[in-house]
Image (cartoon, rainbow, N blue to C red):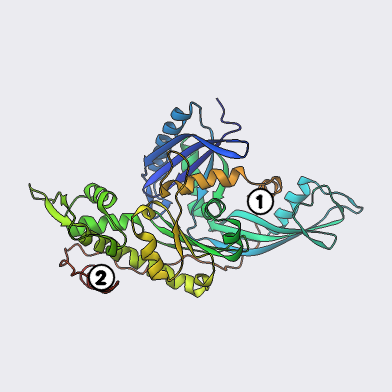
Amino acid sequence: MDNSGLYVGLDIGTTSIKVIVAEKVKGQLNVIGVGNEPSNGLSRGVIVDIDQAAEAIRGAVNQAQEKASIEIKDVIVGAPANMLRIEPCNGLITIDDQSREITAEDVRNVASSAMGTSLPQEREVVDIQPEEFIVDGFDGIKDPRGMVGVRLEMRGKLITGSKGIMHNLQKAVEKAGLNIQSMILTPLAEAHQMLNDGEQDFGTIIIDLGGGQTTATVFHDHQLKFATTDSEGGEYITKDISIVLNSSMSNAEKIKRDYGYADSFQASSDNEFPVEVVGQSEPTYVDEKYLAEIIEARLSQIFDRLKDQLEQVSALDLPGGIVLTGGVAALPGIADLAADQFNANVRVYIPDQMGLRHPSFSSVLSLVSYYSDLSDIQLTTRSAVGATMTKAPKVVEQSAQPTSKPAKQSKPKRPKNKKKRGEGIKNFFSDFFD
């Protein structure tokens, strides 16, 4: 059975691959199938082994199509924000010698004209976003089709990404036996799903705390203005726990999920839990506050680097504050930690759909929601993506480069209780990260 009329989202993350099948009934999305498979072949948000990634994609798709009782062929794929660049673009075409009605083909042609810039060999167009059309000098037009004119212009934003990253992503999906219905930039989809009209208008930051990396994006005037990625995420927290507590990665992940706090102020030194230590037959007992110190230290490092990037573009002055999402955002106390470090209002986004009430499902749900709500003129314009480029774009946004050193494989002394935030973290950094 073809999944025509249904929407299938595919989110390829570093630690897990998620698929959802949804149908839209009277403007409401209903999720009818979900797949969730551990990732293979990915590192820091990008595919490094196409065969392994394709196998993991197939596993997640098989789960979703079994639950939805359909055969999945077409998928809406999320494109990561790695090495993202944004630039203004303008297009202009002459309709005809004499006035006639503007058609969808004219819109595609003017979008192609706007993309008629030569890209370096290593870059590829991910999306083009029209801001306005101009017909014979009359501006502010959202949809020019059906209007009469001789001259059609388009102003908008051109978003480009790494050709290598995009190629590997497409190849893995195709090798999994799937057709890419649309490639959607994940941050755009997340903003559509998570931010209300005022937040998109006045300006808001979304921080997606994934397993392999952390992405911060800034939206203002309903447009993506800035994007930066940090190459550390939840996996680094798990590795820290594993090294410090001398426990396996699988045990460390379970400990993080079951007992972890992002904010050490909210953890108790009286609550202890058993830890299976490598080379010991009996478990060691560790308190929640000590675990929280480990988690808080790594998160603080990530937040500090993002803060530097966001301050450079004055994003922290925007009234919408910060919205946290991604699997790491499920840690208790993370909103308080982020609010303290960024000195901003912070909230955590959690999907409200049954079976998806965890921030790790935010991205895949956003892909389906965004695509299903695209207007006809947006779909028409996006259909021009893929045309041959001939001019290099000016770079206006770049990804942040991580500056943290890899953690040493030695156990630090247990930090003393803190009188203020940062004191214990500072001691922990001096023992563990330097």
Q: CB under 8 Å between callouts 2 and 1?
A: no
Residue toward you, 100 or 329: 329
Q: Residue at x 43, y 73 (%)?
A: 308
Mark 2 closeness class: few <14, some 14–19, many ≥20 residues within 10 Å:
some
Vertical arrangement, residue 33 with respect to residue 378, above or below: above
Image vertical order of residue 136 relative to residue 304, above or below? above
Left of 404 or right of it: where is 348? right
Q: Which residue type does callout 2 highlight?
A: Phe
Please provide percent x and percent y for residue 332.
33, 56
Helix, strand or loop for disc 1 = loop
Secondary-structure class at tag 2 = helix
Q: Quadrant of residue 132 in the image? A: bottom right
- Quarter of the figure with residue 133: bottom right
- Distance CA(mark 2)–CA(mark 1): 49 Å
Q: Report which residue position mark 2 lands on.
A: 429
* Image quarter in which the C terminus is found: bottom left
Mark before the other along the chain sequence, 2 or 1: 1
Q: Quick check: 274 left or right of 129?
A: left
User: Measuring 37% from the left and 44% from the top, which residue is drawn there?
Assistant: 39
| Residue behind mark 1 | 387
In percent of width and height, residue 144 lies at: 79, 52
Q: Give the residue type that dot 1 points to.
A: Ala
Q: Nearer the viewer, mark 2 or mark 1?
A: 2
Task: Give the x, y percent position of residue 74.
Answer: 55, 36
Along the line of sight, which residue is nearer the eye, 401 or 50?
A: 401
Please, is residue 346 above or below residue 275 in the view? below
Please identify the quadrant where the N terminus is shown. top right
